[in-house]
Amino acid sequence: MTNGSLSRRDFLRATAIATGALAAAACGPTAPVQEAAPEAAATGPECEQDWVSGWPPAPIKYDPVVEISVPFNAWPTFKPGHEPTDNPYYNWYLEEMGIKFNIHWMADGELRTQKLQADIAAGTMPDMINLQDPLFNQLIDEGALKEIKDIWEATASPLSLDVHRYPEGKNWIHCFRNNRQELYGLDLGITDKVFCTISWIRNDWLEQLDIPMPDSIEGWDETLHAFNEGGLCDYGITAQKALFSWAHDFTKVFGAYRVMPGLWRDYGDGKLVYDSLTETNKEVLALLNSWYNDGLMDPDFHTLDWASGLNTAADGKAGIVTMPMWGTSRIVEIEKIVGGEFTTMPLPKGPTGEMGRRWTSPVFHAWVFRHDLEDIKVEALIQQLNHQRELHVNGPEKHGAYGPLDDMGNDGLFLEGYDWEWDENCEISLLEWQTGTSFRDVGFHHATYPGYQRHADLNRQRLRKMDPAELTKVERFFIRDPGLARQETAYEQLFEEAEYEIENEYLGVNTPRMNELLPDLQKLEEEVYLSIVLGLKPLDAFDEYVSRWQELGGDEVAEDVNAWYESHTSS
Amino acid sequence: MVEERRASDIIANSIIWLVTLLLVCLCVLPFVAVIAKSLSSAEAVRTNQVNLWPIGINLDNYGFLMREKAFLGAFGVSVARVTVGVTLNLAVIALTAYPLSQDHLHIPGRTIFKVVLVFGMLFQGGLIPTYLAYKSLGLLNHFAVLVLPVALNIFFAILIINFFRGIPKELSESALMDGANHFQILFRIFLPLSLPSLATVGLFAAVTHWNSWFDGIIFLRFEEQWPLQSYLYNQVTMRRLEGTLMSSQFHGKTDPSFLKDATPEALAAAMIMIGSIPIMLVYPFVQRYFVRGLTLGAVKG
Amino acid sequence: MAVRSSVPETAPAAAALSEAYEERKPPFRTVWRQHWMIYAMLAPAAVLLILFHLYPLWGLSIAFVKYSAFKGVMGSPFVGLDNFRRFFEGPDAFNIIRNTLGIALGKIILGQAAGLAFALTINEIRHTLFKRVAQTTTTLPHFLSWVLIGGVMVEILNRSGIVNRGIEALGYTSISFLGDPGIFPYTMILLETWKEFGWGAVIYLAALAGINPETYEAAAVDGAGRWARLRHVSIPGITPIIALLACLSLGYVLNAGFEQILVFINPIVFSTGDILDTYVYRVGLLTGEFSLGTAVGMFRSVVGFVLVWLSYWLADRYANYRIF
């Protein structure tokens, strides 16, 4: 809802995680797992490494060391002997840049929210943290955050400013106050497609039943029924309690009807309306209810979260699996478990035969700094970002053949014995891939920028055109890896379909009364939508929902949203 | 007549046995199902075939846990918590119960102390005030937060006060006459006499400590500091398990045979079993002592 | 709490009080010289009481301001009873209070009845070993945390769980025990009863064991059958304890079971499953409405305190029971 629409509860949690835990847990291992041959390690010493390991040189080294407390994610799985505060990444920043990251706490998901709120209650915030609205607004109002416009503009490299579209990008709108005189946060991440989902279908089942790839919502309906009735799976499609989310969600189904609950949209009359209230949603809810009744979803899906959706897929109980865009590696894993083959599905057409619509990622996040943080620490963090951008954008071309040929999760040091080892042919064989992924969200290590996902793909495409003999072993590895190739295809489709995205048109700052009203409205929506899908409430409950929404103050919210919209469009 | 009585008695007896047996099954079978699941093959668990008997014995789930540093760490924290926590509990309880049971000494201030004690037992500040208080006491993120705030278990203290009251005051009076001081009386007379009661309270305190999880989650910042039950809440209830397992499996690539047969559901079952075993070993004793202590108390009045 | 016998006697506290009037109080210096060790022994408890039971109460002041940690309680704007008003006038208050009372009352009534019935049932068993085994196994769930029980029960009660597979095998449609708002509170009550009935029986069994065996024998000689003995000996014999537990249970009517609900709740059942304690946790700590959460928590603490106090008073008056 409004800002919140972009940040409905689970989604909110997701964003918290997406910078790190999940994104990396899943997007880290993009390449399929290769059975490591234990004896291969013995041949190691004779092989020649024909590329440089490491990162571009640090832009600056602080002496004495700058200590910064940041939250870490709760998924650290390091190689034995390594710790979250003692591993190649941590040590690189410490030794090369003079930045010492202290763990403020380690949590993700609901726990992260809880830790953060407890910190806010007790006034013990970390030096820097990624926040969503409405917390962001509230903390600015309370004077808890540092104003950083001057430091940011003075320290950020031209590259950093450019890739993050500063200051014109719409991701910055909510970070500014006072007519763009003050800047309280850096909206760097998650802005682009991280939350877009890709639906995968069991291709082997399509072939077995001799049905074509469904490209419309009717096709989805028929195919799911065919899978289910053909006895191929217990259910049909993965689902979880959040109907709109970044995994196992139904935004594509709503999109096929050209509605996108949770977003504020301008239907052409210069006014923003809350799309969850649009009448068309009833048709979609009716369809989802019929799927539920026909046993196409886990009967308990409303008590499960994303991870269980993954489980449904891994148990072979679903033919259509909706994954986060960065979930290709998980699909590969699932294929190995269930012994099937998945293919990406095109965005489905709607009942009228017109192309459907897709949801995009929200922009309402910001990395913020505690109000009393010394300038030098803000500066050091921005320098870390500069280094990351240099590495990621220019890495392969300017700094030799290391760096990210894969996407963000693995923009690693790519260390021997850690990430890879030699196989018997003196080629790279993947090992654990844990360095980059386990350190992912410390400071700005995992901050993303629009379109970054394609960067690695474009690099690989460039390399493929070159003479293989000129390539280094690491380059050859990245272009021959089948898992990455599949991800490349999936991303390509995802970016091609970008023209069908529906964007949230409310980008303003929530008013205090909105912050007060939104949680209840959101709870109401969540409950009504789910109840209708589950058949606990009749379809007519939707109309009651619309009037109840207004009763609970929805009209006031709409007023505030439109006040912002008017001022925004007129300026 | 007599035979009729006997027949109806047999019927009544059978019904009683049957009902009791049914209730026993109701309490035991869920745990049997968990054991079965934790020992079954991944395939059987995935396809939902396991009921009360394991299908295709598989120890990978337990193997996984034995290698999972976080799990073992949490188990260790729980053991430490129980040891330190119960010792503190018993020490404080004994020290508190003795003075408050010596009504005949007419120590000034004891009534107000008891009132505050009962008030403290019944009135809680609530989540946020408590959090802020612990923060200003510097307890947050320390192991101490698991044992210190609950060191004075008022409920158990009252139990022991009432027990100490049953010890004849002549014993302590004559000891005082003989020149013994209060500490000596407590340690030489009261404690030996109340060992069974203290053991009961100690076991209860141990169970309470073992089962607590909310405090760990709220007051400790790192998962490594958490006791087992907090860890289980996060892994099983919040379903973090799938992620843990997947990434661990993924990261375990160096060993191709690495527990490929562990599944999230079965792993959860194994965790639940290991979390329950200490309780299952201890609780029959707790129960027996409790009943005995209860009867004693009732007789003493 | 020790359960006292129903034999009338002077309560020690009252006795102490009256004695205090009779005797001349010795001067404090004398007491201190003789008994300073008594105070030394109480010192740890006093410190713990002050630090962990009294000091946190200061934080309740958050309930009366619009709290911001960065301004401190003193610097945050004072809003009087606005936070309480916001809760009671808000859309959730009615549901939450209803759920709390409903679930708690259900647990009290069903729980006490089940414990009593079970105690009377196994009291009839003469076979000592079976009796002991039955008693021990049925108390097992009481000793396990809701986290563990939750892990066990979610698997069993979900739509593809063993219970529903049984229901379906019998030809009925499966039941969403944890995901249907109409059923969720009953599931909570039943689960609590399942967890506690064995333990609840322990106290009744102790009381039953206290009944003089001769009373039974005399009744048997008079020709009383099993049923008659149950009605005329067993039940009257434990009536005091039933009365006592009934009085004490008043103190629990706001205790709907925080840990249990937190483990099982999901968004779809908020309307019938959200209770005061979970609300305080969610609003106070997850949504970050510190003042609102503290206000609701305080409301719950105060009312709960009054209820427990009342229950003690009732227990003292009608069941001759005192905690001291």
Image: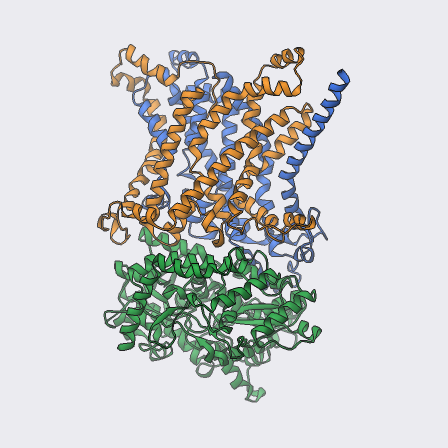
Query: How many numbered marks are there?
Result: 0
Quadrant of the rendering where the N terminus of chain B is positioned: top right
Image colour for chain B is blue
**Where B160 falls versus A476 (above or below)?**
above
Most foreground residue, A448 or A90: A448
Indicate whether B251 appears above or below A257: above
Instruction: Quadrant for residue A427, please give it.
Output: bottom right
How did the renderer colour the structure? by chain
Q: Residue at x 27, y 73 (%)?
A: A567
Q: Which chain is green?
A: A
Q: How far across and down, in percent of the image, does residue A559 sit? A: 30, 66
Q: Which of the pair A232/A188 is nearer the observer?
A: A232
Tell me residue A537's x, y (percent): 51, 56
Q: Position of residue B154 (x, y in %)?
A: 41, 31
Using the image, determine if residue A113 lies above or below residue C80.
below
Relative horizontal placement of residue A156, taking residue C178 as reference (left or right): left
Give the chain ID for the orange colour: C
Residue C246, position as x, y percentages in the image: 47, 28
Using the rendered view, name the quadrant where residue C319 is placed: top left
Residue shown at the point (39%, 46%) measured from the top left: C94
**The one of A212 and A474 positioned closer to us in this rendering:** A212
Can residue A102 be seen here? The reply is: no
Outermost residue toward the right?
A: B3
Q: Is residue A84 left or right of residue B272?
A: left
**Residue A30 seen in the figure:** yes
